[in-house]
Amino acid sequence: MGLSAKKSRKRGKSDSDSDDYDNMEYEEVEDDYDDDGEEEDEEEEHGEEVTDDEDGTGENSEWKNDEMEQLEKEYRDLHHQELDTLKNLKHHKDEDLHKGQAVKSQKALWYKILELRFLLQKPFSSSNSLPQESIKSLFCETDETVRVAYSDLLTSSKETLDSILELQEALFAKNPSITQATVGSEGLSKDLEVSEHLEDNLDQEWSQISQMHKSIASFRDKSINKWQRMTQVTTGAAAIKGKFHAFNQDISNQVAAYMRDPNRMINQMRLRRSAVNIFGSVPEVDDKHKEAETRTDGDPELLDDSEFYQQLLKEFFETVDPSSSEKAFYALKRMQPKKRKIVDRRASKSRKIRYNVHEKIVNFMAPLPANIPPMAPKLFENLFGLKTERLSSSAAAS
Amino acid sequence: MATRDGGMKSTSINGVKMYTIASQQPSLASWLPSNKKQNSHRNVKSYTQNLQLLEDLRFATAATKIKATPDGEYIIASGIYPPQVKVYEVRELGLKFERHLDSEIVDFQVLTDDYSKLAFLCADRSVYLHAKYGKHYSLRIPRMGRDIAYDCWSCDLLCAASSPDLYRINLEQGRFLSSLNTQSPALNVVSRSKIHGLVACGGEDGAVECFDMRVRSSVGRIDAVGPSGDVDQEVTALEFDEDGGFLLAVGSSAGKVLIYDLRSSHPVRIQDHMYGSSILDIKWHRTLNYEQPMLITSDNHVVRIWDPETGEGLTSIEPTTGTINDVCTFPGSGLILLALDCSQIPSYFIPSFGPAPKWCSSLENFTEELDMGGQTTIYDHYKFLTKEELERLNLTNLIGTNLLRAYMHGFFINHALYKKAKALVDPFEYEAYIEQQKREKMEAERASRITVRKKLPKVNRALAARLLETEEAENEKRDGDVDDGEAKKASKKKKGLSMQDLQDERFKAIFTNEEFEIKDSSQEYLALHPMGSKKQTSLLKEHFEPVMSDDDQSLSDSDASTSSQDEPANGMKDKSRVPRMYEIKNEQHAEAFWSQKSLAGEDSLPMGDRVAALKDNQQPSRVPNGVKQGPGGSREITFSTRSSAKYKEDEEDKEVPHRKKRGVQSLGLKPQRPVFRGQGRGKRGNGRRGRR
C-alpha cells in the first residue's frame, strides 16, 4: 500500500513535465481503450487493471520530459563525480578549477534545455486543439495525407522516446551509486511481473518508463538532501532549526507532503472542452457523449501547464536580465518627470484685455455730434510747435 | 481776526473777503434710535444756530472726490469708509441717495448732464457703470487705475493706469478697443479738451503726450516738467482751457503749475505753490467779475485762485481740519466745495470772485449783513518772512507744515512763534559779545607786558649807552658771581655811579645841558680816550698778554707779597680799576699803556721780534715826548735812553721799590715826571720775568 502511494505521488509530479509527444501517446492509449472496452465486456478484473495502466501511461508520458532533464543532470553529475575522484587521487590543486568548469558546462546545458522547453510550449499548447479519437479516425479515412502524417508523428515520437531511454540506461551504467540504490528496491520485481502479463506494446513502453523513473527516485532524493544539508551548514541556517519546522525539513519530505493530494493539482491542470477550441468539435452529440464519459470537470486528455511554464520563464529572465523585474519597472516610472501644460496664466481676472462684446453695455451711451473748431487740424499738425522747431533746426543745419 | 456769526466765518486776505460755511454739527452715536437723536439735537444750541449749506453733507471718515453735474442740479461725492457715493439734490438742499461699492473709488466721471450715467474707477481695477436705478455693469482693466476721462464724441471711456497704455472702453459698442500707447512708463492723469477733443496724458516721467481721437495716434509729446527746473518729477494734473482751447495747465509733483500754449513747447508761465507737495487739481474758472478765466489750483495744503496772465493771486483757501483731496466749483459762481481728509465737506464763498449759485442765493444776504460790520484781517498776528529770513532763524524745516503758510514770495508765521525763534537765535549774539570782551582783555594784557625801551638823551648819547651796557654787564656778573664779596662791592660801586648819573639831579645836567657835551674831536678827549682805546688795541694785537699787565699793576697797587692764588683776584681788581684811571687820572692811564707795551714785546717774542717791538715802542714814545716837552728836550732824552737804557736797567732794578713809591707821589705833583718813570717801570718788569 505504501509503495503504491509513493508511485502515485511520483507519477503526479511527472505530470508537470509533459510534452506533445506525451499527448501523442495519449492518443495511442485511446486506441487501446477501445480494445479494453471489448475486454470489459468479457471480464471485470481486466477492466480494473486496464484503468490503472491508463493512469500510469499518462504519468509516464509526462515523465519523459522530466527524464530528459534528469538525464542531463545525472550525466553531468556522473561526469562531475568522476572528475572529482580522479582529481582527488591525482591532483588536489586542480579540483577547484575543474569544478568551476563543470559548473559552467552544467549551466550551459541547463539553459539549452530551458530553450528547448520554451520552444516546445507553443506546439504543446496547440496540440490540445487536435481532434480526438472518433473524429480523428474520420479524418484519417477521408484523407490519405492526414493518415500518413499521423503515422509519421507516431513513429518519430517512439524513436525519440527510445533514444532518451537508451541515454538514461547509459547514465545508469556509468554511475554505480544509482545501481546500488536500485538493488535495495523490491517493488521493481512486482512491476516487472505485471509488465510481463501485459499484452500491448504501448503498455510495455509506459511500464519501462515508470521503472526507470522509480530506479532513479532513491538516488535523486539522496543527492538533493545531501546538497540541502551542505547549504544549510555553509549559510548557518542550521541554527534556526528549532523554528519554522515546516521549512527545515528535507526537500524530498516537503515535496512528498505537497504531493499527498495530487488529484487537486491534476484537476487544476485539466482543461474543459469548452475552453479549448478543439478542431472538429462541432457535433453536439459527440460533446455530450464525451462529457458523460468524463467523470471530472476537465477532460483528462487536455492538459495545461502554463503556470509551470511561466515560473520557468520568470526565473530565466531574472537570472539573465535583472532589470526586467517588477521593482525596476516601477523605479523607472518614478524617474520620468511630469510634463506641465502650457497655460497663459495672465488670462484670468481680466489681466489681459479681451475684446469681447459685453451685451449689457451695448448702447449704454450715445455719441454726441463732433463739433471740432476749424483751427483744430492746423493746431494738431504742429502741436507744441515741434514741427516748426524741426524745420528751423534743419534750416540751421543746412 | 475771524468772526463767527450764525455759523459763518469770514476772513480777508489782501482785501478779498471769504466766507467759510462748515457744518459743525456734533456727530451722534449710530446706535441711538432716531427719536432720541432728534430730541438730543434740540439741547445743543449750536445745532439750531448752525448754518448748513446742504444737509448731511459729510462722510463717516473722509471724502475723496466731489463733483457737480453739468446741469448744476446735483452734487456727487465719493468717500470712505465704507466705500460709498452720495448724490445730493441742490434744489432740495439735501441728500438724494447713497450707494455703497465694493472697493474705494479712485475717480469717477459723470457721463451725462445729470446723475443718470456714472462711471467709477475703483481700487480693485474695476470700472463700475451705474445707471439711474443702480449698478449696471462692471469691467476690469489689466492694471491699477489712476484717472478716468470720457470722450463724448466717440463714447470712449479713457482710463489712465500704471502702465504705458491708455485703456479704451467703448460704451456704444460695449467692448474694449485697442489701447492708446504712450512712451511714459505709467500714466498719472488723463484730460480731454471740451473744445477740440484733444486728449492729453501726463506720465510719471514728467512728459505730456497728446492724442487725436480721430486718428488714435500720438500727435505731440513734450517734457512738461523740465522747464520748472525740477528733476525727476511727475505730471500730476492736467487741464485744458475751456475758452480758446490753446492753453494747457500742467501740475507737477513738486508743487508747481506750468501754463503751456499748444503752439509752443515753452511754458508761458510757471507758478509755485511753495508747499512742495504735488498739485492735485487744476480748474479754469470763468466768472462775470473778471474778463479772463482764473486758475484754481490745489495741492494737499492750499487752494490758490490766481490770474494766469499776470500770475497775481486773488486769494487762497487753507482748511485746517484736514488735507485736501478734491475741489468742486460751480460754473460762474464764487462758491467752492472741498473734499477733505475728514468727515466734513466745508464750503467757501468768495463774493468778489463770483456770485452765489441760484440754489443758495441766500448766502449773499448773509454776506451783505456781515459786510456792514467792521472786519479785521486774519493776518494781524502773523509775521511775513522770506526764505532768507527763515534760514537765519533756522526754521526752514517748518516749510510744508501748518505753522508756515506759503504766500507770494515767502511765508506767514505766527508772531509768537517768530518771537520764540528770534529769542532762540540770541544766545549766539551773547556768545559773540563774550568773545569780544575776551579779546579786549587779552589785548590789554599784551600791551602791559610789552616793555618800552628808554630813549637815549640827545646830549652825550655815547656815554649814556656805555653806562647802560655796564649796568647790564654788572647784572650778569651778579648772577654769575654770588659768593665773591669783592665782586659785589665792585657792582655796588658801579651801581651808584649809574644811578647817580641817570636819576640824581646834580648829574642830570650831563645829559641835558649842551655845555657838558663831550666833543670827541677835541684834542683833550683824543689825547685820553681815543688814544687809550687805540693803544689797547695795538698792544693786544702786538703782545697778546693782558694778564701780565694786570700782575704789574697789582704789584704797584698793593705792598703785600705776590702769590699765585691772588693773581685772578688782582686781575679782577685791575680790570675794575682801569675805568677809574681812565675816568679820574690821566697820568695813571699813560703809565699803564707804557708798561703794557714793553712787557709784552720783550718776553713773548724772539730776538728779531723783540727788536721790532722796541722799534715800535720807540716811535710812540717819541711822539708824546716831542709833543709834550718840545723838540729840543725830546731829542736829547731819546738818544740817551738808547745807549743808557741797557745800563740803567741794572741800576733801576736795585732801586725799584723806592722809585715806585716816589713816582706815585710825584704823579700828583708833576705831570712830566710820570713819563720817564713809566718807561723805567716797563724795563724793570722785563727783567724780573727774565729772572723767573
Image (cartoon, grey):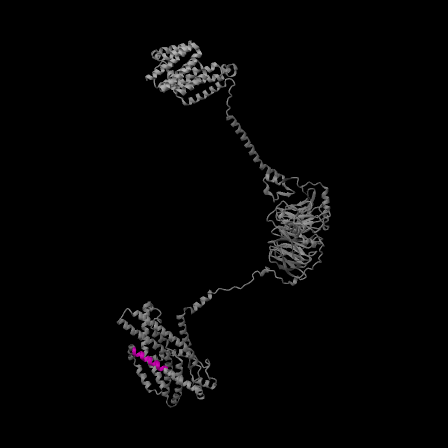
Residue B127, horizontal then vertical, whole percent: 63, 58
Given residues B679 and B71, the one toward you in this image is B679
Q: Is residue A314 above or below residue A29?
A: above
Residue A39 screen position, x and y as percent: 38, 89
B194 left or right of A275 in image: right
Q: Is residue B253 visible?
A: yes
Magenta region, residue range: A160-174
Specify the quadrant that holds the N terminus of chain A: bottom left
- Splitting the image into 4 quarters, where does residue B386 fall? top right
Task: Specify whether residue B36 is in view.
Answer: no
Q: On the image, which quarter does residue A366 sit in?
A: bottom right
- Residue B422 coordinates in the image, percent (x, y): 60, 37
Q: Is residue A136 above or below residue B138?
A: below
Q: How many marks?
A: 0
Q: Which residue, as the protein is rendered here, is positioned at the far bottom?
A: A42
* Front one among B393 and B638: B638
Residue sitting at the far top? B669
Check the image and name the residue furthest to the left: A89
- Kindly identify the residue that appears in the image at 35 percent across and 86 percent down: A201
Is A164 contained in the magenta span? Answer: yes
In the image, B518 versus A140, the foreground residue is B518
Q: Nearer the viewer, residue A362 or A380?
A: A380
Secondary structure character of the magenta stretch overall: helix
Q: Residue B193 at what x, y percent from top left?
A: 68, 53
Q: Is residue A352 rendered magenta in the image? A: no
